[in-house]
Image (spheres, helix red, strand yellow):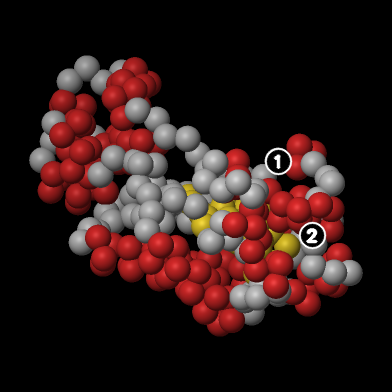
Amino acid sequence: MTRVARGSIFSGAKHFHVLTDGLPGLDVFREPNMKNFYLVTVEEKAKDTGVSVLAYCVMQNHSHLIVTSDDVQNISEFMRRVNTTYAKFFNRINGRSGYVFNGRYESDALKTPDEILAAIYFVHNNPVKARVAVNSGEYLYSSAKDYLNQLSFIDYKELKRLFKKVPELSSYGGSTDEYKFKEAKPYENCDDVLMDLIRRFNITDKAALQDPELLKTIIYELQTRSGVSLRDVAVLVGLDREKIRRTAKKINYNV
């Protein structure tokens, strides 16, 4: 992904909805300690980079943030630090290496108070939509509960500047249908992805995989579309795991 989002850095917006998506099939925030570490990291890096957080929600395999800064480049640095710190933590406690997130992040520029409010509601409603909470205020890992008592690291001063008071999302009367916000991507079956690649690149035998650029493309698409590990990629394409690992190190997953 680009540093904020393609084009949005020139949009004049200072508020953004940011989606960080785990690799498909990898529940990067599956345990409470993982969600808590991520939120502590968000709070620390926001202070370090001059970014204010207006809302957040951490799900099993992705997170949503509503953030703002007078300098949008601060948001790029903030997200880089958050994702790098969390990826190292996740890999360490799981005894793994490699990529954790599906690219850096994606973002939506929020240009009006109405759009910001709709984005906040969208973020807080994620657990309800996913049926892991009956109402947004009961979910432990979103700022919806914080709005009730004005707790945590949320920038309530900015919320009051925008809306005169902290939004009462239980009585939100608008609709998010008018806006299209980034959502976590659905996963694909790895066999279906492999067959798609075979057809697209007219691969007739394993010899075709000696092309380093083709092999990089296959590894990239298998991992980002279906979330398989490098070990699984090696099995799927019938190549040595070390060759797959060396090739994967040359892939830019952030495009």
Q: Picture quarter containing residue 221?
A: top left
| Of 219 and 61, the residue lying toward us | 61
Q: Which mark is residue 4?
A: none
Task: Please report the residue visible at 33 percent of the width from the left and 63 percent of the height from the top.
Answer: 90
Q: How many marks?
A: 2
Position of 6 with respect to 227 (left or right) is: right
Seen in the image, is 110 located left or right of residue 163? left
Q: CA distance from mark 1 to mark 2?
A: 22 Å
Which residue is located at x 35 percent, y 47 percent? 26
Where 45 sits versus 89, above or below? below
Q: Where 152 sits versus 179, above or below?
A: below
The mark closer to the camera, 1 or 2, is 2
The answer, for residue 225, to whether it is visible in the render is yes
Question: Residue flagged by tag 2: what amino acid is it?
Answer: Glu
Up the image or down, 35 lies above or below 26; here it is below
Q: Label 2 near label 1: C-beta < 8 Å?
A: no
The residue most toward the right is 164
Q: Position of residue 168 (x, y in %)?
A: 79, 60
Q: Which residue corresponds to mark 2? A: 168
Q: Measuring from the top left, give residue 102's x and y in whole percent.
A: 43, 49
Residue 57, x across and y down, in percent: 57, 58
> From where the camera sits, is residue 4 visible?
no
| Element on which disc 2 rests | loop
Q: Residue at x 12, y 48 (%)?
A: 242
The residue under label 1 is 180
Q: Position of residue 165 (x, y in %)?
A: 85, 69
Q: Residues within 10 Å of mark 2 (few under 14, many from 20)?
A: few
| Residue 54, above or below 119 | below
Q: Amino acid at mark 1?
A: Lys
Residue ID at (74%, 74%): 156
